[in-house]
Amino acid sequence: MKKISFFGLGNMGGPMAANLVKAGYEVCVYDLVPSAVHELVGLGAKAADTPEAVVADADIIISMLPAGKHVASLYKSLIGPADQPNRYLKKGALVIDCSTIDAATIKALYIELNNIDVGCIDAPVSGGVAGATNGTLSFMVGGQLEQFSAAKPILEVMGKNIFHAGEVGAGQIAKVCNNMLLSILMVGTSEALQLGIDNGLDPSKLSEIMSNSSGSNWTLDVYNPCPGVSESVPSSNDYKPGFMTNLMLKDLGLAMDTAIASGSSTPMGALTRNLYALHQKSGNGELDFSSIFKQFSQK
Ligand code: NAD
């Protein structure tokens, strides 16, 4: 069985690594937060004191880190200086970066790793903490088909839908397209619901009507932002995340960077990013992203 190193044991990486351990893989973990490491060791993972020791003998290196700068800096230290590269990574190993980061960072990393005979794919996820815990994430993978095929059995332990989006970086592009659309749908659903409420409609009845009409969409049907319409969603639990406004804003920033780089016109995405920036500034960064509804409902 392949030996796995896992970096980043936060809200997402912790349960993802736990699922690999439960599936019987030998997993060596690393995080800057000792308690996160101890929790995984308690489940049967191995640990080492330095990132370099964690990757010794690893066939697969998975990272689930906050942003591009963390990913770039981790692998820079593992690859080593240009005059004596690759002191730590096994030749033929495969890096699977699952973080949501800019496509440019993963493309640059792919080239550096390729030069030292280490594979690299981007595999950002959708499905949130619940998906990570239940092993039902969607993975959007960018990379060579051969490397995708090698990663697939491991990704299947952590996810339900594993998509090959295209060449390296394509997973990140698919991810920002999806989240930009999600945020636009969330804002549209929120303003439509509030328009109905302001004109005397019951939001549950209006949701039922629109869900069975052409306005049907995931944010209305499954993740309704109006408190009290659906049970077990963040809006009916004081907007506890779920998927934080801070993270949605980060993804919308990546979407805008992507649009600028490709010269694409994304007016709805730009407007939505601005709405979420205002929402964050109003103190809602730690709330679920469906709390944008409050911007429309507050008197
Ligand atoms: P998090 O902040 O909970 O966890 C990140 C972890 O990385 C932390 O435990 C931190 O200590 C660790 N870390 C930072 N630098 C490190 C380093 N150099 N070496 C080892 N560990 C390091 O974040 P999260 O919610 O788990 O998100 C991780 C990634 O997944 C982000 O890119 C995020 O955008 C993406 N994502 C998150 C969600 C979600 O719902 N939380 C959903 C989809 C995608």
Image (spheres, rainbow, N blue to C red):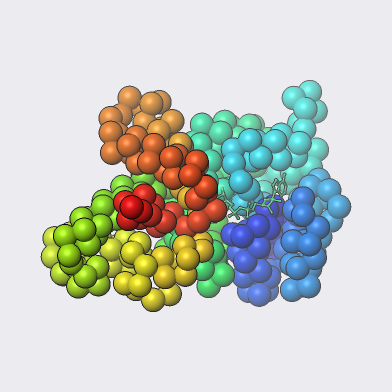
Indicate the position of residue 16 as horizontal and vertical percent values. Answer: 60, 64
Residue at the image position 21 percent from the left and 70 percent from the top? 202
In the image, is residue 15 above or below residue 22?
Answer: above
Give whichever of 247, 187 is nearer the camera: 187
**Is 106 left, or right, of 75 in this rendering?**
left
Indicate the position of residue 126 as horizontal and vertical percent values. Answer: 45, 57
Residue positioned most to the right: 49
In the image, is residue 100 above or below residue 157?
Answer: above
Give whichever of 115, 163 is nearer the camera: 163
User: For the image shown, how many numbered marks are present on the structure?
Assistant: 0
Residue 12 seen in this snapshot:
yes
Can you say which quadrant of the picture contains the N terminus? bottom right
Residue at the image position 78 percent from the left and 72 percent from the top? 42
Residue at the image position 36 percent from the left and 45 percent from the top? 180
In the image, is residue 238 above or below residue 142?
Answer: below
Indicate the position of residue 217 as horizontal and vertical percent values. Answer: 25, 61
